Image: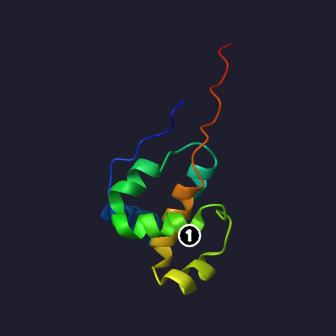
Amino acid sequence: TEGIKLEFDKEAIEEIAGMVEVKQSTVEHYLCDFHQAGVLDLRPWIKSQMDPEILKTSLKYFKGKEQSKLRDAKLELGYEYRELRFARTYAQGFSPLPAKASA
């Protein structure tokens, strides 16, 4: 399976956050969790939403240290946590959940 495809933008995340009465960052964390669980491949969406230079620089930073703290990346690169969170998620790659066996 390829995972679910996202067809919305940052404003949609803000709208979802408002509907369920949570912060935008909470929705973004859930999206990253779904990616890491193999349910949702965020990479195409991240690539379409991020500034290409910020993504490129961040990916260089996270290469080989995908589990590093965002705080350390922010101190070194100076980017926003949102950008760094998505770049780190992108750098982690995607492993889709195995397809369920038919009964």
Circle 1 residue: 61
Q: Residues within 10 Å of mark 1 (few under 14, many from 20)?
A: some
The location of residue 67, given as percent across then percent down, is: 68, 65
Q: Foreground: 40 or 15?
A: 40
Is residue 39 visible in the rendered image? The answer is yes
Q: Foreground: 66 or 80?
A: 66
Colour option used: rainbow
- The residue sitting at 62% across, 51% down in the picture is 36
**In the image, what residue type sits under mark 1?**
Tyr
The location of residue 99, given as percent across then percent down, is: 62, 26
Quadrant position of the N terminus in the picture: top right
**Relative to 49, is 87 on the left or the right?**
right
The location of residue 63, given as percent across then percent down, is: 60, 61
Number of numbered discs overlaid on the protein picture: 1
Q: Foreground: 24 or 73?
A: 73
Does dot 1 land on a helix, a strand or a loop?
helix
**Relative to 52, is 102 on the left or the right?**
right
- The residue sitting at 57% across, 49% down in the picture is 93
- The residue sitting at 42% across, 57% down in the picture is 46
- The residue sitting at 45% across, 79% down in the picture is 80
The location of residue 85, given as percent across then percent down, is: 53, 68
Quadrant position of the C terminus in the picture: top right
Q: Foreground: 95 or 35?
A: 95
Q: Quadrant of residue 15?
A: bottom left
Q: Quadrant of residue 66?
A: bottom right
Is residue 22 visible in the rendered image? The answer is no
